[in-house]
Image (spheres, rainbow, N blue to C red):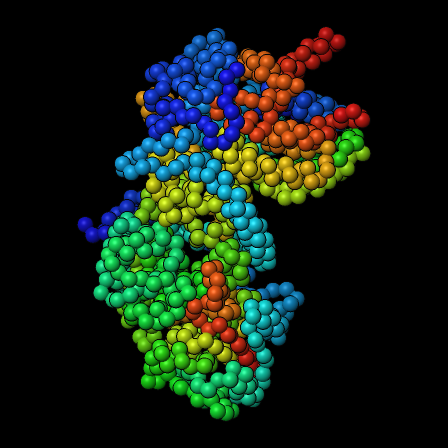
């Protein structure tokens, strides 16, 4: 008998005959932001900004036509010379770069190249106001997971219409078949002290008010 | 109205003043108190110590003694919680639907619930000129959910100076058999409770469970802390200076 | 009176208590009616004193002989008390210390106690803030409990669905019946890959993966450690735990603070993910509840800094080989307990420990001397459910609680931990009922129940007990008691019982009233 068969048998014995109806789940929890603080879209976006900032993330609002300048300004602040970006990052985002070389992840960059870069720029799939979270799922402008993990600085561009109020809205927008990384602020320092060993220690965001 | 008094076995044997206080309080408020003579123990100690069979036997006995008692009032919050919620678990563990039905048919109130919810009184005409702290015992606050009823009753007592107990919601460490099976932890817990009680400057610590009070009071007594313990019923029954 | 000194740890063990699983087995005679007399312990309260009120009269005795004495109780229960001498467990290994013994040692470490109390205070404040914030916290808890029950009550189907989905996504699912099976499976998967990056977590500690890798000579690095950064980047093989397994999609979900697991599951070529098989959830949308409950209950955060969710092999992104090891290791045993299976709802947040007044004072070790299982209140139910209660250590855990209920109040999936502790206490007692000679405690509790089964017996016993206790009292206080109850009077006085019980007073009053009428 295989281990699988044995465990399956133990589960059957433990539970008896299969149930005809599954346990009902009371879903009385909130599936959107409520209350006066979230009356309008602008309120939801403002809450996102507030929560992200509270997590130690530098965040700025920019208009769509200011984005390229704002990206260049962040990279200038990092004194970045070389960054890595997803191969499908919109070209316009990097249009104002001056003296910064952007390496697209195509062909695939190796880990040492990622590690040697001064930072990365990505978009996101969805963002959650209540928790100050951005979610990357490998979709447009996000690239593979290593791009937002290995470089020590991460600039994430969030379009205002990607911001939802609460976690259930984000979960419902996402496809579990895609690899997801939910990022709520920079990684915490380990309890043993010292800097966090993984993930960009600097996280910045630009919220594009379209 | 007519009230059947349920006195916990520990209160009966060790703290008869509490039952006497409930009797005089309810009679003072114009109600008739009866004491069903067949009552002994609700079975809580057996149940919480793992003696399910014995507990179920005592529960059956209790439901029989009080079957036709109508409104039942007890000054013991933990026993009220046992009858009201543990009896269901006992019945299920013993596969005894008759017991579950009998338990569901009982109308048991802890004293402060009865005063505030059923009688609708908070000022019971008591006078107790002392500085008093209230310990919300775990069964009173979590298992029964008496909430602020005891505090509302205490605030209406003339002459009483109610002081807030720091970290009041933390267990005193009694826990029935825990107090002896895990005596070291129990004592460490009561040491902190006693420290908080002394910090209040209270003369009297009150609660709705005499067993917890015996534990805290025993530690206060050992330390000669000058704080005495009293069941809340005894404060509510008091009308004079000398209580 | 011959009473022992009060300092902790001075208890002289009785030979009969050395093997707690046999307590009562070497002492009493066969008959419940007098087992007390021969269960007198050698070291403490049995000598002299409180013998007056007479021996145990069990259920089989005639009612007329009048019940149950305090002195007997003292002698009897003292036979149950813990001792430093430890026997061997059923497996022949030295038995682990019972909770009370290990707790005594933990309490003696004043520095550790201070740290524990301080961190407990901070954890409680964070927990209260994080769970107090959402207006729908109670609705989330109700949903979380139901989601977990829904998963557990149909666990076989959910695990099979999970396996199909993972396989369809290019991954491989392995099944491990025991911790050693899990160790063997993981070791065989990682053996040829050079240094292994390990993102430590509860399930990896549970199966003692680090020991297994060391025994096999497999080099491993702690991905969360100070050197983790470069070594994880160099490692071809990585091992992580998992928080949730989504059955309908085959998705593994992992929440963390520091990104160690995220690095492992992103950078390795071959990923081995070890998961408790209880962590299945039916649908992806169930995560909308659990992703709110777990972080808030665990660390007081709105959401963990890093959450990873992945399904099998993702072409062009991350590991090209993905394995998920589903660990039973006692979980099916828990599942088979109709009452106890509620413990499997646990999502590992640790909130019950954060609010537990017992845990605050003794820490992890007394619950979990081997460092492999959950500790705190959930550990006190999980371990005996998963391992059984035939060992002294596991049998002591259900009693390691005052049943104060603080844990149940905060549990994000509404596990009734006090209810489960009481259930397990019943299992411990029932397991000992079958012994040829009853444990002393059983004799006491039976005797008490028998006494309480009749109001006159009860009254007579109270009368005798009070008379005796009043003899012991000085100035209205009892400062020393023998036997197990001496554990009470080590630090607490006992008020002397009154001369008149309530029921005697009541009867006297009724008689006086009748005369007046």
Q: Residue at x 33, y 58 (%)?
A: C274
x and y percentages locating residue A52 in the rendered image: 56, 71
- Looking at the image, is C372 positioned above or below residue B239? below
Q: Is residue C86 visible?
A: yes
- Pick the quarter of the image with the C terminus of chain C: top right
- Looking at the image, is C198 positioned above or below residue C484? below
Answer left or right for A162 relative to C323.
right
> On the image, which quarter does residue A207 sit in?
bottom right
x and y percentages locating residue C68 in the rendered image: 49, 15
Answer left or right for A172 relative to C189.
right
Answer left or right for C91 relative to C12.
left
- Looking at the image, is C301 positioned above or below residue A117? above
> On the image, which quarter does residue C260 sit in?
bottom left
Q: Residue at x 40, y 41 (%)?
A: C340
In the displayed orientation, state which residue is furthest to the left.
A1
x and y percentages locating residue C234 in the rendered image: 32, 71
Answer left or right for C205 relative to A194.
left
x and y percentages locating residue A199 in the rendered image: 44, 71
Q: Residue at x 72, y 12 (%)?
A: C513
Q: How many marks?
A: 0
Q: Residue at x 28, y 62 (%)?
A: C219
- Looking at the image, is C389 positioned above or below residue A110? above
Q: Is residue B147 visible?
A: no
- Which residue is more in the foreground, B12 or C120? C120
> On the image, which quarter does residue C236 sit in?
bottom left
């Amino acid at each position: 008998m295989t281990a699988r068969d044995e465990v399956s048998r133990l589960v059957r014995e433990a539970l008896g005959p299969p149930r005809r109806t599954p346990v009902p789940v009371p879903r009385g929890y909130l599936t959107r932001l409520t209350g006066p603080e979230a009356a309008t879209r602008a309120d939801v976006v403002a809450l996102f900004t507030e929560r992200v900032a509270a997590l130690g993330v530098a965040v700025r609002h920019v208009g769509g036509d200011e984005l390229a300048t704002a990206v260049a300004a962040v990279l200038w602040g990092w004194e970045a010379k070389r960054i890595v970006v997803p191969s499908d990052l919109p070209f316009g985002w990097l249009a104002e770069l001056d003296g910064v070389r952007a390496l697209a992840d195509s062909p695939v960059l190796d880990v040492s190249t990622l590690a040697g870069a001064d930072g990365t720029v990505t978009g996101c799939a969805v963002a959650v106001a209540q928790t100050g979270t951005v979610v990357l799922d490998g979709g447009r402008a996000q690239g593979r997971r290593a791009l937002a993990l290995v470089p020590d600085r991460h600039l994430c561009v969030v379009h205002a219409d990607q911001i939802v109020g609460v976690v259930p809205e984000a979960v419902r927008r996402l496809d579990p078949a895609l690899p997801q990384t939910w990022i709520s602020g920079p990684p915490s320092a380990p309890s043993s002290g010292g800097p966090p060993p993984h993930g960009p220690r600097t996280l910045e965001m630009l919220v594009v008010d379209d | 109205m007519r009230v059947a008094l349920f006195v916990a076995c520990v209160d009966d044997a060790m703290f008869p003043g509490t039952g006497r206080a409930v009797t005089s309080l309810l009679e003072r408020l114009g109600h008739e108190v009866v004491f069903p003579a067949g009552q002994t123990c609700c079975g809580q100690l057996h149940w919480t110590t793992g003696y399910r069979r014995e507990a179920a036997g005592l529960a059956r006995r209790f439901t029989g003694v009080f079957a036709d008692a109508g409104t039942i009032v007890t000054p013991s919050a933990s026993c009220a919680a046992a009858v009201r919620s543990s009896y269901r678990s006992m019945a299920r563990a013993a596969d005894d639907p008759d017991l579950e039905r009998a338990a569901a048919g009982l109308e048991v109130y802890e004293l402060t619930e009865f005063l505030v919810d059923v009688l609708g009184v908070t000022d019971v005409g008591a006078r107790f000129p002392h500085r008093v702290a209230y310990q919300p015992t775990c069964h009173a606050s979590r298992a029964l959910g008496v909430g602020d009823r005891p505090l509302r009753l205490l605030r209406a007592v003339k002459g009483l100076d109610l002081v807030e107990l720091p970290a009041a919601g933390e267990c005193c460490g009694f826990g029935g058999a825990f107090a002896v099976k895990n005596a070291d932890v129990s004592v460490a817990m009561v040491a902190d409770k006693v420290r908080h009680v002394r910090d209040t400057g209270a003369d009297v610590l009150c609660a709705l469970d005499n067993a917890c009070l015996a534990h805290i009071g025993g530690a206060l007594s050992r330390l000669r802390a000058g704080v005495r313990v009293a069941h809340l019923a005894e404060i509510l029954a008091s009308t004079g200076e000398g209580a | 009176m011959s009473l022992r000194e009060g300092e902790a740890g001075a208890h002289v063990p009785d030979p009969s208590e050395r093997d707690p699983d046999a307590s009562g087995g070497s002492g009493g005679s066969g008959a419940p009616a007098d087992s007390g007399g021969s269960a007198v312990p050698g070291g403490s309260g049995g000598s002299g004193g409180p013998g007056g009120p007479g021996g145990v009269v069990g259920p089989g005795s005639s009612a007329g002989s009048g019940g149950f004495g305090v002195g007997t109780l003292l002698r009897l229960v003292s036979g149950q008390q813990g001792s430093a001498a430890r026997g061997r467990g059923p497996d022949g290994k030295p038995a682990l210390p019972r909770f009370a013994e290990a707790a005594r040692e933990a309490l003696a470490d004043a520095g550790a106690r201070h740290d524990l109390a301080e961190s407990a205070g901070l954890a409680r404040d964070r927990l209260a803030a994080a769970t107090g914030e959402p207006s729908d916290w109670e609705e989330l808890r109700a949903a979380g409990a139901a989601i977990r029950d829904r998963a557990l009550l149909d666990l076989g189907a959910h695990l099979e669905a999970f396996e199909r989905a993972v396989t369809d996504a290019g991954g491989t699912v392995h099944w491990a019946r025991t911790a050693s099976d899990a160790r063997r499976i993981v070791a065989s998967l990682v053996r040829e890959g050079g240094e292994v990056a390990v993102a430590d977590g509860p399930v990896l500690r549970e199966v003692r993966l680090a020991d297994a890798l060391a025994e096999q000579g497999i080099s491993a690095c702690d991905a969360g450690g100070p050197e983790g950064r470069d070594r994880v980047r160099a490692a071809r093989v990585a091992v992580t735990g998992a928080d949730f397994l989504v059955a309908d999609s085959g998705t593994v979900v992992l929440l963390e603070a520091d990104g160690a697991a995220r690095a492992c599951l992103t950078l390795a070529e071959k990923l081995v993910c070890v998961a408790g098989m209880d962590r299945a959830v039916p649908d992806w949308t169930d995560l909308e509840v659990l992703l709110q409950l777990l972080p808030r209950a665990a660390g007081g955060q709105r959401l963990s800094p890093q959450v990873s969710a992945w399904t099998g092999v993702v072409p062009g992104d991350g590991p090209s080989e993905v394995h998920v090891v589903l660990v039973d290791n006692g979980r099916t045993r828990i599942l088979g307990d109709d009452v106890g299976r509620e413990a499997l709802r646990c999502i590992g947040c640790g909130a019950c420990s954060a609010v537990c007044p017992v845990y605050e004072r003794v820490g992890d070790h007394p619950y979990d001397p081997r460092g492999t299982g959950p500790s705190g209140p959930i550990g006190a139910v999980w371990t005996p459910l998963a391992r059984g209660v035939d060992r002294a250590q596991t049998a002591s855990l259900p009693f390691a609680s005052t049943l104060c209920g603080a844990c149940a109040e905060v549990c994000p999936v509404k596990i009734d931990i006090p209810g489960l502790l009481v259930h397990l206490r019943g299992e411990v007692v029932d397991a000992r009922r079958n012994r040829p000679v009853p444990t002393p405690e059983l004799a006491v509790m039976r005797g008490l129940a028998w006494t309480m089964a009749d109001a006159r017996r009860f009254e007579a016993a109270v009368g005798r007990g009070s008379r005796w206790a009043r003899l012991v009292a000085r100035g209205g206080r009892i400062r020393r008691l023998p036997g197990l109850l001496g554990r009470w009077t080590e630090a607490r006085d006992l008020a002397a019982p009154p001369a008149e019980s309530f029921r005697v007073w009541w009867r006297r009053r009724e008689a006086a009233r009748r005369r007046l009428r």
